């Protein structure tokens, strides 16, 4: 498995912010740059380095890029002081400041690493090596992904007043250590979309490379096991998510439908819920995921169900169990409850493979890939359902039912009902529990957040849904 071998080597070389073994982060290191990008293998190693950075860096996807939104939307009750201060809006307290500054810095560090790759591709041209277009497409898509997730966290909601939206995030598209001016919310969205549309063109080869029936084998090197790369369908799915977040449902549906109609992604069979192999990328549903063992180690003690462990940072929200039908009050049993929440191990086990609870030296021998699910196919069906709610409620219901039937629930259409916006909101929370998406749902709709019995943050307040920038962003620029 050549791809995963490279991936693991990169992960070992990236304990925190460092990526110096794979990418030159100092513009003066032109000799190292020249050596790094003289071959196709050099570009591939550089990209593996980026993916490893995303999967090992604690302020990115192995940890806080997910947990901060989960804490902010009250999907968890919080023991960790920094996250609790963030959840109640006490942004200036030291630990909360450290956390929000760390995410910002790590994301822009990774963006600069990506831009280093893009800069060299621009020098060598799109056809310098056999797969240069793939390298370019993945790099542009990763740049868009990182900017979009920073925008979701630090940018104003789409419904905010113009003054709040005038200054969103810097969109850094050049490998440089100079100051990049802030873009407005609309400008940032347009730049994200532009990068993704260019990436889509570059990744056309994935129509062949991404197989409809996948395994965890990577014998073909860089062009195999494409679900651990920002592949063509990951780009289209991210475009659907971006447009959806912007309330442009017409364009969101265009891209969601492309992914669905590709026929490359299906749903977990019932047997997968009966014998769950958690903490892995699902070979049926995952459109894009990041190979990571570091996330398993972090999540093993972080996300408890009832707070029995004194080592845990969070416990589950009090209402988590009531979200899922368990057969006690109806004939329906939601497969997700037993498959994803393990009361014996006291954890949200969908995020952690069992070997990380039962072995001091875990060695995974399963059929999937350990890692972090970034985008899965159910989201595309939900987007299609929402886009068609008013214009074609029956077809909207068909898309919705296609997901919930695989989760053990009765189809609405067979009961003579059509899907509603509330149905979608509730189902999205259930489906993406622990994936950091519910806060985005609440932000988009301006929902009040009940952080605790005594604290409710008003959804109509822009500051409820906008993490403050690091203080240095204001001190170091004059715009």
Image: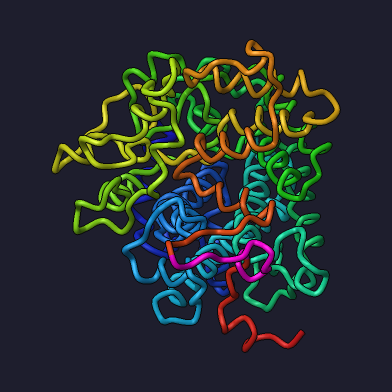
Q: How far from the left and from the top, in percent, is residue 41?
A: 52, 42
Q: Residue at x 45, y 14 (%)?
A: 269
Image height of 125 relative to 77, above or below:
above
Where residue 393 sits, quadrant-wise, is top right
In the rendered image, residue 106 lying in the magenta stretch gets the answer no
Frontmost residue, 263 versus 417 = 417
Q: Between 214 and 166, which is closer to the camera in this rendering?
A: 166
Q: Is residue 162 left or right of residue 45?
A: right
Res 172 visible: no
Q: Quadrant of the N terminus?
A: top left
446 is higher (above) or lower (below) than 175: above
Q: Quadrant of the C terminus?
A: bottom right
Residue 424 x/y as whole percent:
64, 34
Which residue is at 37% across, 32% downward?
A: 340
Q: Residue lying furthest left in this view?
A: 360
Looking at the image, what colour scheme do you see?
A: rainbow
Q: Nearer the viewer, residue 85 or 196?
A: 85
Residue drawn at (73%, 43%) of the image: 244
- The span picked out in magenta is 454-465
Residue 227 can be seen in this image? yes
């Amino acid at each position: 498995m050549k791809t995963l071998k490279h991936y693991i080597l990169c992960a070992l070389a990236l304990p925190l912010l460092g990526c110096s073994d794979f990418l030159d982060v100092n513009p003066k290191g032109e000799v190292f740059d020249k050596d790094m990008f003289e071959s196709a293998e050099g570009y591939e190693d550089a990209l593996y380095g980026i993916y490893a950075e995303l999967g090992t860096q604690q302020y990115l996807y192995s940890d806080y890029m997910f947990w901060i939104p989960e804490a902010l939307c009250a999907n968890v009750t919080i023991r960790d002081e920094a996250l609790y201060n963030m959840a109640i809006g006490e942004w200036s307290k030291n630990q909360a400041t450290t956390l929000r500054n760390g995410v910002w810095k790590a994301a822009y560090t990774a963006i600069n690493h990506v831009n280093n790759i893009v800069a060299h591709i621009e020098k060598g041209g799109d056809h310098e090596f056999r797969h240069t277009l793939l390298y370019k497409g993945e790099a542009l898509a990763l740049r868009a992904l990182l900017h979009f997730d920073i925008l979701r966290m630090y940018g104003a909601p789409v419904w905010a007043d113009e003054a709040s939206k005038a200054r969103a995030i810097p969109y850094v598209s050049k490998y440089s250590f100079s100051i990049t001016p802030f873009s407005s919310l609309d400008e940032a969205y347009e730049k994200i979309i532009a990068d993704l549309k260019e990436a889509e063109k570059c990744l056309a080869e994935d129509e062949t490379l991404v197989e409809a029936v996948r395994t965890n084998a990577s014998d073909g090197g860089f062009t195999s096991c494409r679900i651990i790369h920002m592949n063509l369908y990951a780009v289209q799915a991210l475009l659907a998510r971006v447009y959806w977040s912007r309330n442009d449902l017409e364009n969101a549906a265009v891209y969601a439908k492309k992914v669905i109609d590709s026929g490359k992604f299906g749903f977990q069979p019932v047997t997968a819920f009966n014998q769950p192999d958690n903490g892995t990328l699902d070979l049926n549903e995952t459109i894009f995921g990041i190979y990571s063992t570091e996330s398993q180690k972090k999540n093993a003690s972080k996300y408890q169900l009832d707070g029995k462990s004194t080592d845990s940072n969070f416990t589950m929200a009090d209402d988590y169990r009531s979200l899922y039908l368990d057969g006690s009050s109806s004939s329906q049993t939601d497969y997700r409850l037993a498959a994803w929440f393990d009361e014996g191990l006291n954890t949200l086990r969908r995020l952690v493979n069992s070997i990380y609870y039962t072995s001091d030296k875990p060695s995974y021998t399963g059929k999937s890939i350990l890692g972090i699910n970034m985008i899965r196919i159910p989201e595309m069906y939900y987007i299609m359902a929402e886009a068609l709610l008013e214009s074609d409620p029956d077809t909207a219901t068909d898309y919705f039912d296609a997901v919930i039937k695989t989760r053990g629930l009765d189809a609405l259409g067979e009961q003579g009902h059509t899907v509603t916006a509330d149905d979608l909101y509730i189902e999205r929370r259930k489906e993406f529990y622990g994936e950091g998406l519910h806060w985005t749902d609440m932000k988009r709709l301006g929902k009040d957040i009940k952080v605790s019995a005594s604290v409710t943050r008003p959804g109509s307040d822009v500051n409820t849904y906008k993490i403050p920038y690091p203080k240095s962003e204001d001190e170091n620029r004059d715009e």
